[in-house]
């Protein structure tokens, strides 16, 4: 038996690239708890590890003192992880007695909150009961002691119908009440194997007993080698997925320990499984051998523990440091928590806070290589120790760690449609509020130095002083040596017109010394970078390059140690952006994150950053996150230029425009009826051309992207200056063309472009400012083909005009998709968080 054990374990260790494994020493003590102690272990030499108190970060950006040491202060290089599947996982453990029907409903509701992540099949597993002992399942076997697993291709509604049908057909007692019920659920986006019931999660170790049941978000890269080795041991596989090796590996290790006369605890068992895995994962384990227990662990994929326990969650705390506003850290840090009643707690594990906020606001955002064990109404957190090659150290045991409980500041209403028909419609209309939240505590536009908590429009009492100071600033721009009076006026004005970004404040001197700024993003985030590149160039005077994240590593883009790379991602989990981040970090560049998701990979792996605080965005097509990204990037450019007297006049102009922006967005939303009428005229069209230049080029690109995403109409964003280099050949009375022509320094060129298109009888819709009489006159005098349609929007400063301009274009895309009868919130083939290459 010992020879067999050695051969099997060595083969499994080699499968993950770990070389040969040492022969097992004396069998480990039988343990049922998750406590880790000394003793030999299967597949590794004996050893012990003491727990360490490690404070949780709660998703906040890490901050350190500025200086050269910041660049040198790097931990071990993170092992490169593969793309993470666009899946969602959700689990529920109730220590108090509860009906099984309620547990199933909780799981289904949790999955519905994760629908926006994209999926093609779904499934769940719950505990069986004694009354199910004689109820046969689809295999003809009784359900006694086994997890009840339900899986279905398609939407959550199909899974719900499948559960109801199976429960009725098998005579399951859905109303049975029991304590310590554990349920796990999953939405799957196919990466290995086509969408089908057999490939859907949860996956079981075997159909006969279902000793172990697992859901997984991520990709196991060495699953083929593990599968081959397990098949050589007689293990049978039922699916095409990489995930199925995980529960089968758990059963293999468990049976192996029993054959040695020992029994592994749940935490120890999961540790052995994870030790053999390579890739990215968030994993949840339930087992009939450990009833009432649940283990979750993660590496490279998000996982949140939510705690509905008044004794653990009602502590007071939190700081005022700027950073992600979605959570605030409590004073209480725990590695073990238990209710006073001992068995009254409810726990939730999820890929996303949106699935748990309606139940509780007390959460722990697990870090990579952390594991949580739920049992007996309490939880414990552990951390794996990895070596310099990224592998879990041979012979090491996971150490207990202390993690801070955080309080979510999002509300359940944020993930509900309310009175709106679709999430996209709701999120478009939320933009005045989301932009105010983005700027709250960051834009200082009043004369009171202690009003950082709110965005306040300019106070009328200070307008005269502001005008005098602005005149002084304009004079300084043309004078080499300003007078003391001028400097005093400028200083007074600068104190009243400021930007404060706590997440990057300590790093501003380093960023200012950078030789180049590199803006990196994908899709809508890339367009936000495109929209703000001119603002960085103008205000900072630093060379700025713009990069698609997927293209950086492909062409081995030169990144230098004196570069600052700014990574923009709504989810903070975009695979291509993370790869680009790793690429830049490996070359010594300072990395800055701009995200909307607390605890995301980008917010944790960059050296500093800013959360956009736009709130939960459920619709796949990004709307409010885009406008908040632009505002955040403009605020960053303003903060970087704060030390420049020559830029003061411009900074004041932009800061005042920021304070007025929510009101301008509200006015732009009043164009909804007009956009609905225009959408009806475009319903039968198959192509759309969108033109813009300067600050408006990004609006053209984002409009074209929104139309593609939700209406399935071909659309193309084109730089107006390139119209004569090919696109002009497409122009006739049958091709709808949108021209973004609000007034800026390129206005005359845009007007010339409109004239050329009219001369060729183009079907034009022109985005113009409300006070633009020239375009209005031209539209009336146009004697060409199809009459020009003017879309009049509120005017603001040029670098923020794109935030206003995109609102009617978002509305147009939304109404066009609705008229076409398409799924607005979940366009075909798309997912909210693109976490695979």
Image (cartoon, rainbow, N blue to C red):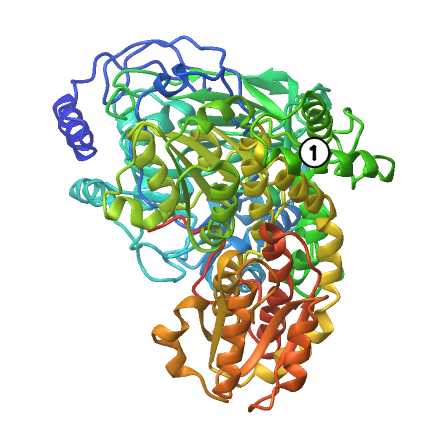
Q: Position of residue 767 (x, y in %)?
A: 61, 69
In this view, the residue in front, 395 or 617, is: 617
Q: Looking at the image, is 241 positioned above or below residue 682?
A: above
Q: Looking at the image, is 423 positioned above or below residue 789?
A: above
The residue at the point 65 percent across, 63 percent down is 422
Q: Position of residue 791 (x, y in %)?
A: 66, 72
Q: Residue furthest right?
A: 461
Dividing the picture into quarters, in which one does residue 301 lie?
top left
Query: On the picture, is 807 further left or further right than 420?
Result: left
In this view, the residue in front, 541 or 586, is: 541
Query: On the picture, is 8 further left or further right than 614?
Result: left
The residue at the point 58 percent across, 70 percent down is 813
Tell how many labels: 1
Q: Looking at the image, is 688 positioned above or below residue 449?
A: below
Q: Position of residue 251 (x, y in %)?
A: 32, 36
Dividing the picture into quarters, in which one does residue 298 lie?
top left
Dividing the picture into quarters, in which one does residue 322 lie?
top right
Q: Which residue is mark 1?
A: 472
- Does residue 166 appear in the picture of this structure? no
In this view, the residue in front, 333 or 243, is: 333
The residue at the point 53 percent across, 63 percent down is 826
């Amino acid at each position: 038996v010992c020879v067999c054990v050695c051969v099997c374990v060595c083969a499994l260790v080699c499968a993950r690239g770990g070389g040969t494994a040492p022969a097992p020493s004396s069998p480990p003590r039988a343990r049922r708890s998750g406590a880790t102690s000394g003793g030999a272990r299967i597949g590794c030499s004996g050893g012990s590890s003491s727990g360490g108190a490690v404070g949780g970060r709660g998703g906040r950006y890490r901050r350190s003192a500025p200086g050269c040491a910041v660049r040198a202060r790097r931990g071990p290089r993170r092992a490169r992880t593969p793309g993470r599947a666009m899946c969602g996982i959700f689990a529920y453990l109730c220590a108090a007695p509860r009906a099984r029907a309620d547990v199933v409903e909780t799981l289904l509701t949790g999955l519905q909150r994760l629908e926006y992540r994209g999926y093609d099949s779904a499934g769940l597993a719950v505990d069986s009961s004694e009354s199910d002992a004689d109820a046969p399942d689809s295999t003809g076997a009784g359900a006694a002691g086994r997890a009840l697993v339900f899986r279905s291709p398609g939407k959550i509604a199909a899974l719900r119908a499948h559960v109801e049908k199976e429960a009725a057909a098998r005579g399951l007692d859905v109303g049975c009440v029991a304590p310590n019920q554990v349920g796990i659920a999953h939405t799957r986006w196919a990466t290995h194997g086509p969408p089908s019931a057999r490939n859907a999660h949860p996956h079981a170790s075997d159909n006969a007993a279902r000793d172990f049941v697992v859901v997984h978000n991520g990709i196991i890269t060495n699953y083929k080698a593990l599968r081959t080795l397990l098949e050589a041991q007689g293990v049978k596989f039922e699916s095409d997925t990489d995930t199925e090796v995980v529960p089968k590996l758990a059963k293999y290790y468990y049976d192996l320990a029993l054959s040695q006369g020992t029994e592994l605890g749940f935490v120890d068992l999961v540790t052995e499984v994870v030790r053999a895995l390579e890739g990215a994962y968030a994993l949840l384990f339930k087992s009939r051998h450990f009833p009432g227990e649940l283990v979750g662990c993660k590496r490279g994929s998000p996982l949140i523990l939510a705690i509905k326990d008044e004794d653990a969650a009602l502590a007071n705390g939190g700081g005022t440091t700027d950073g992600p506003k979605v959570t605030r850290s409590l004073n209480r840090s725990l590695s073990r928590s238990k209710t006073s009643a001992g068995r009254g707690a409810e726990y939730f594990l999820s890929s996303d806070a949106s699935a748990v906020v309606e139940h509780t606001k007390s959460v722990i955002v697990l870090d990579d290589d952390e594991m949580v064990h739920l049992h007996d109404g309490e939880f414990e957190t552990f951390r794996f120790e990895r070596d310099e090659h990224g592998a879990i150290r041979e012979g090491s045991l996971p150490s207990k760690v202390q993690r801070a409980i955080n309080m979510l500041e999002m509300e359940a209403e944020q993930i509900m449609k309310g009175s709106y028909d679709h999430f996209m419609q709701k999120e478009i209309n939320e933009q005045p509020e989301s932009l105010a939240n983005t700027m709250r505590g960051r834009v200082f536009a009043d004369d009171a130095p202690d009003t950082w908590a709110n965005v306040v429009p300019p106070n009328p009492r200070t307008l005269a002083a502001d005008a005098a100071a602005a005149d002084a600033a304009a004079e300084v721009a043309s004078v080499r040596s300003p007078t003391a009076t001028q400097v005093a006026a400028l200083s007074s004005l600068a104190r009243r017109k400021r930007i404060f970004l706590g997440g990057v404040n300590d790093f501003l001197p380093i960023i200012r010394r950078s030789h180049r700024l590199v803006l990196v993003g994908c899709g809508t985030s890339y367009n936000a970078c495109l929209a703000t590149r001119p603002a960085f160039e103008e205000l900072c005077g630093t060379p700025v390059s713009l990069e698609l994240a997927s293209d950086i590593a492909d062409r081995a883009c030169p990144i230098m140690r004196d570069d600052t790379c700014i990574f923009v991602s709504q989810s903070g989990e975009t695979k291509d952006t993370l790869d680009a981040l790793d690429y830049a970090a490996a070359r010594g560049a300072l990395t800055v994150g701009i995200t909307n998701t607390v605890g995301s990979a980008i917010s944790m792996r960059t050296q500093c950053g800013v959360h956009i605080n736009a709130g939960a965005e459920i619709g796949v097509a990004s709307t409010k996150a885009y406008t908040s990204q632009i505002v955040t990037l403009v605020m960053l450019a303003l903060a970087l230029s704060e030390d420049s007297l020559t830029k003061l006049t411009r900074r004041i102009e932009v800061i005042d425009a920021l304070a007025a922006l929510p009101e301008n967005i509200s006015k732009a939303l009043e164009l909804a009826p007009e956009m609905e009428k225009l959408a009806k005229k475009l319903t039968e069209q198959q192509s759309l051309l969108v033109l813009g230049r300067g600050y408006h080029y990004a609006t053209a690109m984002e409009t074209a992207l929104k139309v593609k995403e939700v209406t399935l109409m071909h659309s193309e964003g084109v730089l107006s200056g390139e119209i004569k280099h090919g696109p002009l050949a497409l122009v006739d009375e049958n091709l709808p063309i949108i021209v973004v022509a609000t007034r800026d320094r390129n206005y005359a060129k845009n007007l010339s472009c409109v004239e050329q298109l009219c001369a060729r009888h183009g079907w034009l819709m022109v985005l113009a400012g409300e006070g633009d009489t020239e375009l209005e006159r031209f539209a009336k005098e146009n004697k060409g083909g199809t009459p020009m349609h003017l879309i009049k929007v509120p005017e603001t400063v040029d670098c923020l005009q794109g935030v206003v301009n995109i609102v009617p274009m978002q509305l147009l895309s939304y109404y066009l998709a609705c008229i076409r009868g398409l799924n607005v919130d979940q366009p075909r083939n798309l997912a909210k968080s693109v976490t695979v290459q």
